[in-house]
Amino acid sequence: MTSTTQPVRLTALAPLPLPGTVGADNPADAGRSIWDEPQTDARTTRGMTRAKRLGLVFGAVAVVATGVGVSAYYVGRGGALPQVTTAVLSRGAVTKVVVTTGSVQPVTSVSVGSQVSGTVSWLGADFNSIVRKGQVIARLDPSLFEAQVAQARSGVVMANANLDRSRVSLLDTQVQYRRMKELSDRQLVSASDLDAASSAVASAAASLKGSEAQVVQAQASLNQAQVTLEHTVITAPSGGTVMQRSVDVGQTVAASMSSPTMFVIAADLTRMQLNATIDESDIGMIRPGQPVTFSVDAYPGIPFTGTVLQVRLQALVVSNVTTYPTIIDVPNPEAKLRPGMTATVTVVVANRSDVLRVPNGALRVRPTAEMLSAMGQPAGTTAPTAKLSSSEGRVWTFTKGVLSPVSVRLGITDGAFTELLEPGLAAGTTVVTAFTTATTSAATAKSATMASPLLGAQPGGRRGR
């Protein structure tokens, strides 16, 4: 698409003879005024009356006055003469995009913390360390937890001892009851003695069950102490790369309310995701699967590609501007992209190929009536003032020096070109993209003004007689 600038020049008009002389070049007319009757044949004199001659003279003066007056208006305002910059309609591709910003993040990242409080005694991973699942990456001081395990073990031993004592007591009461039963059958003891022996058996059985429960409780306490001791060893929940380390050896971590973060591990840095925010005015054009291109400051001039993965419904309002998070899937086989990089994102929302397109500058042209008059356009050429909708536009064609407004229907735009729908125009049509002015010097403007015979001045600054 080429554009040209075509200056519009006002044609210099030949000065008319001033009243007083008819033709200076004709010796026969010397000293004769146009108001005098011509010395010709009587028939010729009758063919052209004095009124007709006056009408022709004043008509010519009016035309010259109009052209020179408009020229003097523009020249007097600083020597600005209108010029036209044009371009030719062409066929090509138009791609509509939505531009925003986003942040590069790993697809999966895991925060590794400690479930128990303690002092860090050893670290097995650092920044950028590559770890595997189950690998030990930190240890806490286990002395306090080992003491708790020992105490829980002693509780288990004591509970087992009480259980044995309860079993022996039950056997003794059962033997006593059998003896009392034999004596009661021979009516050697009273019924109350037999009832007391029976109650002793039931009490010993209940005590045995309580001892068994104490053993289970003591074992559970031991298991809990052992699990707590195991939590002093921090392992990687998944393989990946350590992006963050928040503790050092000797630092105390407290897990009273929540688990403190010690490491952040990215599972796979060969696939990343771009977290972008799309303005509410553009979110209606975003769909999963749309292609995306973006760039980062770390690699200027290198384009990266991705695909829209998800448009989330959660709205984010910042400074009274509503945006929606959009997740973009990004391959990163060379690991150039790093977590946290800021990206300038371009989402392709529509693409048209081999369509008639017009430069956007042609849609912004608004010539004034004065400019059209100064350029010598036909009397019927005016600048339409009707308000256009968002899908309508107007261009000015420039053919053989004549400007003509043409209404068109608009399609998508890429910022530089706009698609024309049913335009009534064809490729190769010349359209105006800008009106500019050619500055004329003040001396030139003054000279042009003084040279005008209609303004009563002669070259050199002397007024004519």
Image (tube, grey):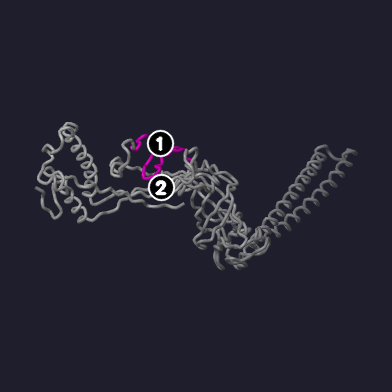
Q: What's the magenta region?
A: 382-410
Q: Amino acid at mark 1?
A: Leu
Looking at the image, tell me whether mark 2 or mark 1 is earlier in sequence order: 2
Instruction: Name, please, the residue furthest toward the right.
Output: 186
Q: In the rendering, at what x and y percent does residue 347 appear?
A: 53, 49
Q: In the rendering, at what x and y percent does residue 322 appear?
A: 46, 43
Q: In the rendering, at what x and y percent does residue 273 appear?
A: 58, 53
Q: In the rendering, at what x and y percent does residue 46 appear?
A: 17, 31
Where, by quadrant of the figure, is residue 151 drawn?
bottom right
Does any portion of residue 356 appear in the rendered image?
yes
Give the SS element for disc 1.
loop
Towards the viewer: 184 or 325: 325
Residue beneath the point at 56% across and 51% down: 292
Whether residue 110 is situated above or below residue 379 in the rendered picture:
below
Residue that badge 2 annotates: 361
Say left or right for 155 vs 325: right
Question: Could you classify mark 2 by the number of other residues whose Cα lies within 10 Å: few (under 14), some (14-19), or many (20 or more)?
Answer: some
Towards the viewer: 357 or 334: 357
Residue beneath the point at 15% across and 54% down: 459
Residue that badge 1 annotates: 388
Towards the viewer: 382 or 116: 382
Towards the viewer: 214 or 266: 266
- Is residue 290 in the magenta section? no
